Image (spheres, rainbow, N blue to C red):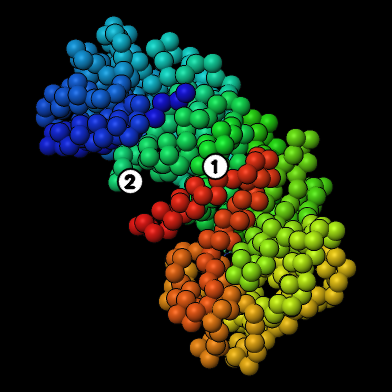
Amino acid sequence: MSLIAVAIAVDSADEVEGAIAAAQAEAARGATMIEWRVDGLAGHEGALESIARLVKNTPKPCIVTIRSSAEGGGFSGDEEERLNLLLAVCKLDAAPSCVDLELGAFQKSPSFQREFAAAKRSTRLILSSHDFEGRPADLHKRIAAMWSEPLCSIAKVAWRARSVRDNLEAFELLHTQHKPTIALCMGPFGIASRVLAPKFNGFLTYARAEGDLGTAPGQLSVQELKHLYHLSRLTRSTRVFGVVGWPVEHSLSPLLHNAAFAAADFDGAYVPFAVPSEWEHFKASVGELFESPLLQLGGLSITLPHKEHALRWCKERGGTADAVSEWCGAANTLVKDLSGTISAVNTDAPAAVAALATGLGIDQQASARLASGDADHSSPADVEAAARWSRQRVAVLGAGGATRAIVAGLLLAGAEVVVANRTHERASQLAAQFNQRKDPGGREARVKALPLDQLAAHSFNAIVNATSAGMTGGGSESSDPLPADCKIAPGMAVMDMVYRPRETPLVRRARKAGAVVIDGTQMFLRQAAIQFQMFTGRNPPMKLWSELLEQKLSGPR
Ligand code: NAP
């Protein structure tokens, strides 16, 4: 099991007591090592005494690091002084478990090498190398140079990832080393390397102190590593899953899937993969992730803006696609079976229709089957649900990817659909695209596009917001996408796909009007549940998921 080392920066003697208290708090949270980053402190008079106090009072084994500014640290003083201080730290009665020194500095200082060898007692030497620009061209040479030094106990390489593919190289490095090694990718593309280090037997993964920005970009907190990613469960055989999006850091999918893996005792880990918007990025990144024999990638959730890319990529690669993805031109799930075949599936459509069904009193499981093109026409439940849906007229607001998915699902279920969007041409195009083709069941599609200002003249059984109006962070949190003259009748079903916040302006208005309200979490949970079943073959813990979402969405954001 890899250690979790919390890096705590100490810039002056005044900070020592606070830093010790912070280390104790991190140890209580689950940190198994503390890295004292004394770059700032090292330049001050009496630095050795302060470092001795830190080391003596560290609640867990510790590393002492005085990082030079040349390798991204805060020490810009005299080099000889830095090395002498590090040597003095190794000679303390209560010496640290490890000291970290950059490979370049070590190679340049034969006197440090000599004195460290002479002084060496229990303290182990981490030789390290950092690149804040990107993967160093001589990465492998650097590791080989570290291991060619007899004094090196632990080799560390860290570089700024330029794409999620860099993580694969870090894993390859860890996998091929036979001695304790740390290989980490910094920045938003490198989260997987920090989370999955235990799978590849990394010596440690660094974490930031709670409420701190961390000492390197992309560090997660101990809380996140332990309770969001369940680090202690990871083993060599852990299968990896994840979510691909841009941006992806706010996705709630890791929270749900990792909690469900733990609850089901399924050997899996679920991580975010940030992949920039363009098709070329998606194709290259997702291709390499799935092809990596080391990663053992079992499946991916796909979020904005890659749902169309996912379908295209899967088809170009010779994979299969379900009827809904084919019909609406987008998939939110890629799953690899044991034979290596990859399938593109759209779980948004059945999830949205099943969630809406709860507000219309229609069997939700039968509705999900209808909306995914998997209805059993000999089943009374499916026949009854199809009959009920054929009498529903649903207004869907929007013309983006989410609209496309729910429209496809509603049409498959047999409903009549009206789309209305802020930019009317997009709604017209969307309707025309569906109406040009028969649905996967061979029926003519029934989609009508109406300008928003004509909606009020029509009546509906249900209204669905599939726009991002009302969403936190989208710039239109206070917007209600339903025109003010549209009446919401008591008992009507109103669903908002937006789930951040749960109480959108439309949800509030619909509740006030006495409608049956379905908030965005209902669809979100259902689409994740279908994915979880595909990833693991097991049922997800829906009650636990609802509780986690409740905590997350009602707590501070
Ligand atoms: P998208 O492809 O970017 O489409 C956004 C749509 O929202 C467009 O039709 C856009 O209209 C409209 N829009 C944006 N701001 C608006 C405003 N202020 N007033 C009125 N209309 C506005 O996004 P998407 O993938 O379809 O997703 C839409 C929403 O559904 C997002 O909030 C997303 O989080 C949510 N969603 C939820 C789930 C779930 O599981 N609950 C699943 C998928 C999506 P224009 O065409 O005029 O720009």
Bin the neighbour count of mark 1 within 10 Å (Cα to Cα): few under 14, some 14-19, many 20 and up: many
State the residue position of label 2: 213
Give the number of marks. 2
Residue displayed at 54% across by 42% down: 260
Question: Percent position (x, y) of residue 488?
Answer: 54, 84
- Specify the quadrant of the image occupied by residue 419: bottom right
Question: Percent position (x, y) of residue 325?
Answer: 75, 59
**Nearest to the observer: residue 540 or residue 188:** 540
Residue most extreme to the top:
118
Residue 493 in view: yes
Q: CA distance from mark 2 to mark 1?
A: 29 Å
Q: Earlier in the sequence, mark 2 or mark 1?
A: 2
Give above or below for 505 relative to 216. below
Give above or below for 132 relative to 434. above
Q: Does ligand 1 reach within 8 Å of label 2's beta carbon?
A: no
Which numbered disc, 2 or 1, marks the residue closer to the eye? 1
Secondary structure, mark 1, is: helix
**Nearest to the observer: residue 357 or residue 93:** 357
Question: Percent position (x, y) of residue 93?
Answer: 19, 12
Bin the neighbour count of mark 2 within 10 Å (Cα to Cα): few under 14, some 14-19, many 20 and up: few
Q: Amino acid at mark 1?
A: Ala
Residue displayed at 58% across by 79% down: 492
In the picture, measured across the screen, residue 394 lies left or right of residue 179, that is: right
Residue 130 in view: no
- The quadrant of the rendering that contains the C terminus is bottom left
Q: Amino acid at mark 2?
A: Leu
Question: Percent position (x, y) of residue 475?
Answer: 45, 72
Residue displayed at 57% across by 37% down: 264
State the residue position of label 1: 260
Give above or below for 369 relative to 116. below
Residue displayed at 65% across by 83% down: 460
Give above or below for 345 relative to 362. above
